[in-house]
Image: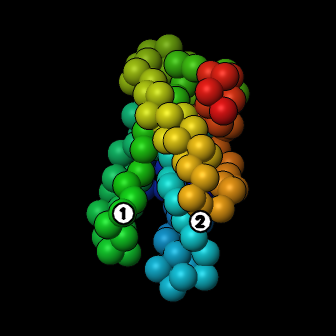
Amino acid sequence: WIDTDTSGLVWSGLDCDDDLAVLAALALHKRQIISLDGISICGGNAPLFHTWKDILALWKHADGFQITNMQPVKGYGWRSMQVAVSWLSWYNRVRPDEMDSENASIAIIERSRDKSLDPVHILMLGPPTNLARAIDSDLL
């Protein structure tokens, strides 16, 4: 599982490393070198509004590597976290991020409960808000 704040394809993107990590993981999954169970998106270097837009564009361009059993899930954004960079904090006050979604946390919980699969390993490339919310929900 990868939880990330992809932002290489949007104007507010400060980096593209998460996008590259997702592409590499999709390629490794397609070749059955790793088992990628899910991709969840959070706000981080960019607001959720932009990170979600980025993963949808990335998914479209990569065509999900024809992985039909998985789609990215939206999670928590700047409304649920402390934005660390001052000008991004200002931007969040001027144009508040979109509403958070608990879909990523729910998906993480559901995957972790699936006893028919190996234990889940979560690679946190963005802020750990989605995982923290899953743990905090007392559902794990």
Classify 86 as above or below 60. Answer: above
Label 2, secondary structure: give it: helix
Write down the residue under mark 1: 69
Colour setting: rainbow
Quarter of the C terminus within the rendering: top right
Classify 80 as above or below 19. Answer: above
Residue 61: x and y in percent read 32, 68
Residue 99: x and y in percent read 40, 21
Write down the residue under mark 2: 21
Which residue is rendered at x = 54% and y = 82% of the image? 32
For residue 16, side relative to residue 101 (left or right)? right
Quarter of the N terminus within the rendering: bottom right
Which residue is rendered at x = 36% and y = 63% of the image? 69
| Residue that sits furthest to the bottom in the current view | 31
Residue 85: x and y in percent read 67, 30
How many numbered discs?
2
Instruction: In this rendered view, identify the residue nearer to me: 115 or 60.
Output: 115
Which residue is rendered at x = 66% and y = 22% of the image? 138
Residue 37: x and y in percent read 52, 60
Classify 14 as above or below 30. Answer: above
Label 1, secondary structure: give it: loop
